[in-house]
Amino acid sequence: MERVALKIGYLGTNYHGFQIQPQSELLTIEGELLKALKKLDIIEDRKSANYSAAGRTDKGVHALAQVVSFDTSNPNVAPRMINSMLPDDIWAYALAKPVPGFNARKDAVSREYRYFLFLHTDLDITRMREASELFIGTHDFSNFSQPEVESHSTIREIKRIEVELGNKNSFVVIDIEASGFLRKMVRKIVSALRMVGSGIKDRRWIEALLELRIKEEIEPAPAFGLLLKNVSYRGVKFVEDEYAKRRILERLRADLVLHATMAAVLGDMTDEYQRSEKS
């Protein structure tokens, strides 16, 4: 037996989150991945393989570099082989052979998320940047989590947060790095920053939330804008499968053409209806 770690990417649009739900027929990324690993005789089941995953992204969230690890006696494990059994919107592209006992979740040093916030209203980016600095450091993020599912500590440390204009100024791009995140934490932080940027709230409101002087339920930003960008480890070297990457790029470029064209069509339809409203 040897320990294997895989970097997995996916588009979460068609899935009910990453984590498998054993007593449900809902489609999940992890469910499809485990099904492929079993079909290829890479693992027998998750328990005997000591399977672990770095994170549990919500329904509709995407990933560039999710990481899973497991034990296998199959000597021919390769990303391209696994991709042959996966749907087109889930893919493996890099492999590492870490030390025995490596755990993709517990051994992660940091996780990085990126959120794409569409600029359909005016937002004050300077105010958002100033407010974002309040999140850096160790805080109790009770106001930025989903309380009914949090049974452990709600204290987390944010190492880095950056707010920038991107993609020809049509999006605000928010990068957040921490050792770990609570359920819906990133999306609630994005919502809070959006409210500050639009002038609905100010930085004193953020301070009060972080200091638990007030209790408030924040509506999370939509899941479709969130990307799990990277998970970092010490001493683990991933080797990319170039053939797998070429095939993934082909698929992503085709999707990009489709969605860019659809964005243009929807924009034109919106413009036409707005013009007819004014006439």
Image (cartoon, rainbow, N blue to C red):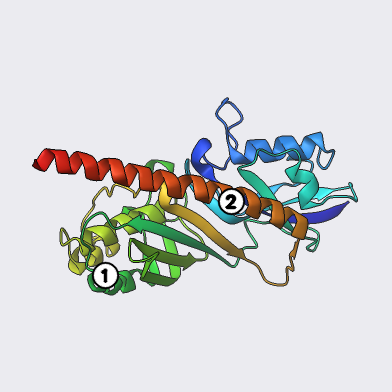
User: In the image, what residue occupies the spot 81% across and 41% down?
Assistant: 43
As measured in the structure, the alpha-carbon distance from the residue carrying label 1 to the one carrying label 2 is: 30 Å
Residue at the extreme front of the image, as rendered: 279
Residue 88, given in percent of the width and then of the height, sits at: 64, 41
Decide if residue 277 is on the left or right side of residue 67: left
Residue 117 screen position, x and y as percent: 35, 57
Q: Is residue 116 visible?
A: yes
Q: Residue at x 36, y 66 (%)?
A: 168
How busy is the neighbourhood of tag 1: few (under 14 within 10 Å), some, or many (20 plus)?
A: some
Q: Which residue is mark 2?
A: 252
Residue 236: % across, % down: 73, 68
Q: Amino acid at mark 2?
A: Leu
Q: Quadrant of the C terminus?
A: top left
Total numbered circles: 2
Q: Is residue 259 above or below residue 185?
A: above
**Which image quadrant for residue 249?**
bottom right
Measuring 57% from the left and 62% from the top, which residue is drawn there? 230
Asked whether residue 6 appears in the rendered view, the answer is no
Residue 156 occupies which quadrant of the picture? Answer: bottom left
Q: Position of residue 261 (x, y in %)?
A: 44, 46
Q: Nearer the viewer, residue 194 or 268?
A: 268
Residue annotated with mark 1: 125
Q: Residue at x 41, y 43 (%)?
A: 262
Whether the residues at callouts 1 and 2 have beta carbons within 8 Å, the answer is no
Q: Nearer the viewer, residue 205 or 152?
A: 205
Secondary element under disc 2, as helix, strand or loop, is helix
User: Looking at this view, is 254 or 2 the one in front?
Assistant: 254
Determine whether the residue tagged by mark 1 lies in a helix, strand or loop. Answer: helix
Residue 5 location, quadrant: bottom right
